[in-house]
Image: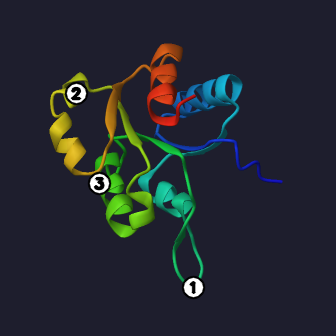
Amino acid sequence: MYNYNMKKILIVDDDPVCLKLIKTLLIDNYHCEVDIVESAAQALHCIYEMGMEWKPKWYDLILMDINLPVLNGDVVTKIIKESETRMEHIPVIAITVDPTAAVEKDKFLKLGITDIVIKPITNEKLAAIMKKYLNI
């Protein structure tokens, strides 16, 4: 049975260690429902239920690595935000190892990314994200 009070979060990252760490922190500390995927294609398939038409699943927050192979997270975010108006207000937090991404924040904001967090993701960084975007 689905708990409608539980926050649902999607993590998109090609690093399995990072995926497992963030998922564990979210479940243990915030009791969230967490989906994880390792690529842009998997993210799109996870967000959209396939059928006669694409129907988006609802997420309360998306943590998106912006340096994904084949299709970068910033481009995936743009596709998600432009394809479904109900998704445009879902916070997409870019997670990256590239410290220069924070300097280029305006470029990412124009693509629909809400904020940027530099890896490694720590308890403190995750707590700040959860408080700021989900009021937890």
Q: Tell which circle, 2 or 3, labels the residue nearer the N-terminal end.
A: 3
Secondary structure under the numbered disc 1 in the rendered image = loop
Identity of the amino acid at label 1?
Met
107 up-or-down from 41: above or below:
above
List x then y, in percent, for residue 14: 46, 40
Furthest-right residue in this view:
1
Q: Which residue is mark 3?
A: 75
Identity of the amino acid at label 2?
Ala
Instruction: Depth check: give the residue in front, 86 or 78.
Output: 86
Q: Nearer the viewer, mark 2 or mark 3?
A: 2
Q: How is the image coloured?
A: rainbow
Q: Are marks 2 and 3 in contact (CB under 8 Å)?
A: no
Whole-angstrom CA distance, mark 3 to mark 1, is 25 Å
- In the rendered image, the quadrant that contains the N terminus is bottom right
Q: Residue at x 22, y 31 (%)?
A: 101
Q: Which residue is mark 2?
A: 102
Q: Which mark is residue 27?
A: none
Q: Residue at x 32, y 65 (%)?
A: 82
Q: Tell which circle, 3 or 1, labels the residue nearer the N-terminal end.
A: 1
List x then y, in percent, for residue 9: 57, 43
Whole-angstrom CA distance, mark 1 to mark 2, is 40 Å
Q: Which residue is mark 1?
A: 52
Q: Are marks 3 and 1 in contact (CB under 8 Å)?
A: no
Q: Is residue 67 left or right of residue 28?
A: left
